[in-house]
């Protein structure tokens, strides 16, 4: 007789993406995945400073993807986006074992593009005390140490709505954490 848990695990593995899949929890449940990614960032942030958000929940009207409350009752919106090469995903799904090599300028260009795309959205609800973009990546060529050095000196353009942006990486076993980089944004256009 089969163990029901084994069948669930087999089903999840069968449907898991073959490339850059570290954040592919509950692939068929977009809202659960987005909330899990934001929760992961907030837990990582709380390792270095007091976490100022509570009551994290998936937003019923998208965008933003998730909502949380500040300790004094303000509303915070979180928008989630993956940094991954779609063509490489598709090649791997067809049986090719390849990965994408990124140049520094391609990473900065892609992050700039994501910031612009998410900054132009019409965010429902609000008003928001903060709108935070969480970009997650499991691209094998994008390493935290290298990008931390690169992005520490890069200033992204001004935003109209987004107040903060973070790049989140897969779990780092030696440090027992999910490393992240806060992207420097030039400020908000008023």
Image (cartoon, helix red, strand yellow):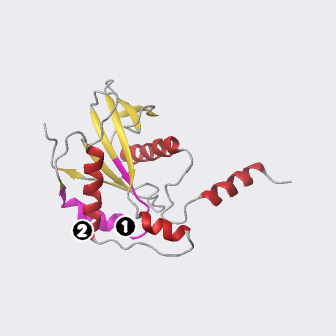
Mark 2: few, some, or many residues within 10 Å (few <14, many ≥20)?
A: few
**Residue 105, labelled with which disc?**
2
Indicate the secondary structure of the residue bearing disc 2.
Answer: helix
Residue 95 in magenta stretch: no
Residue 51 seen in this snapshot: no
**Residue under circle 1?**
143
Q: Position of residue 130 (x, y in %)?
A: 27, 35
Q: Position of residue 177 (x, y in %)?
A: 44, 54
Q: Which residues are magenta?
A: 134-155
Name the front one of labels 1 and 2: 2
Residue visible at 46% across and 63% down in the picture: 174
Residue visible at 30% across and 68% down in the picture: 146
Q: Position of residue 180 (x, y in %)?
A: 35, 54
> Relative to residue 161, is residue 17 depicted above or below?
below
In the figure, residue 2 lies in which quadrant?
bottom right
> Relative to residue 135, is residue 49 depicted above or below?
above
């Amino acid at each position: 007789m089969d163990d029901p848990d084994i069948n669930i695990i087999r089903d999840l593995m069968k449907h898991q993406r073959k490339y850059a899949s570290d954040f592919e929890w509950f692939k068929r449940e977009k809202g659960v995945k987005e909330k899990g990614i934001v929760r992961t960032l907030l837990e990582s942030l709380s390792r270095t400073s007091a976490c100022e958000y509570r009551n994290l929940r998936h937003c019923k009207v998208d965008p933003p993807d998730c909502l949380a409350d500040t300790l004094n009752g303000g509303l915070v919106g979180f928008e989630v986006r993956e940094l991954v090469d779609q063509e490489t995903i598709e090649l791997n799904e067809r049986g090719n074992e390849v990965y994408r090599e990124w140049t520094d300028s391609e990473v900065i260009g892609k992050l700039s593009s994501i910031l612009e795309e998410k900054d132009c959205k019409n965010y429902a609800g609000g008003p928001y005390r903060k709108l935070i973009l969480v970009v997650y990546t499991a691209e094998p060529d994008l390493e935290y140490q290298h990008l931390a050095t690169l992005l520490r000196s890069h200033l992204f353009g001004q935003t109209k709505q987004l107040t903060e942006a973070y790049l989140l990486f897969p779990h780092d076993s030696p440090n027992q954490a999910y490393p992240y980089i806060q992207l420097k944004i030039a400020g908000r256009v008023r």
